[in-house]
Image (tube, helix red, strand yellow):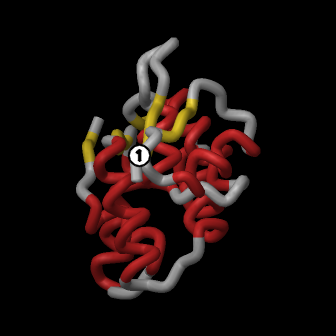
């Protein structure tokens, strides 16, 4: 099994450097690949910030990537849950934070908008932290 870095995943998904993209495709075709959640988190940030991908495009790219039979990821269930949350307007990073919490843990945030979106998406145990003004 080969674990890959963010730049390998970015080359595979963007094809912006023909030589590196070809090398990334060959690597992914050669055998089992393992992708850490932190690599996916960073890849999402790079795709959004540097390449202008929106959350829908990132979700689609990751869904296809993680759907490959030879691609494995850390905590597959929480990544699948995070990708599902992005369909409800939750950014990938927030969705990953939320879906990675331990079972039964309440997730709190000062970001009221995130709490509302998470609740509308059906996430339970999400709460805002009250702030005295």
Q: Residue at x 38, y 49 (%)?
A: 30
| Residue 90 in picture, x, y percent from top left | 60, 55
* Depicted 13 relative to depicted 60: above or below: below
Q: In this image, 86 relative to 10: left or right?
A: right
Where is the N terminus found, in terms of image quarters?
A: top left
* Depicted 126 relative to depicted 56: above or below: above
Q: Which residue is mark 1?
A: 131
Query: Residue 94, can we see it?
Result: yes
Q: Residue at x 65, y 61 (%)?
A: 60
Q: In this image, 4 relative to 62: left or right?
A: left
Q: Residue at x 31, y 42 (%)?
A: 36
Going by the picture, which residue comes out furthest to the front? 133
| Residue 61 in picture, x, y percent from top left | 58, 63
Q: Residue at x 75, y 44 (%)?
A: 120
Q: Front-most of 128 and 92?
A: 128
> Mark 1 packing: few (<14 Cα in 10 Å), some, or many (20+)?
few
Numbered-mark total: 1
Assign a secondary structure to mark 1: loop
Q: Quadrant of residue 64?
A: bottom right
Q: In this image, 104 relative to 19: left or right?
A: right
| Residue 21 in picture, x, y percent from top left | 37, 76
| Residue 72 in picture, x, y percent from top left | 44, 36
Query: Residue 70, can we see it?
Result: no
């Amino acid at each position: 099994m080969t674990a890959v870095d963010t730049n390998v995943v970015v080359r595979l998904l963007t094809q912006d450097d023909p030589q590196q993209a070809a090398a990334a495709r060959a690597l992914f075709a050669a055998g089992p690949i393992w992708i850490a959640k932190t690599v996916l988190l960073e890849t999402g940030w790079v795709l959004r910030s540097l390449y202008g991908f929106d959350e829908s495009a990132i979700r689609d790219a990751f869904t296809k990537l993680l759907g490959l039979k030879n691609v494995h990821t850390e905590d597959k269930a929480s990544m699948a849950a995070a990708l599902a949350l992005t369909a409800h307007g939750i950014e990938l990073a927030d969705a990953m934070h939320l879906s990675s919490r331990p079972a039964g843990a309440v997730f709190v945030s000062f970001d009221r908008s995130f709490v509302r979106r998470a609740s509308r998406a059906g996430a339970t145990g999400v709460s805002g932290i009250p702030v005295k003004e």
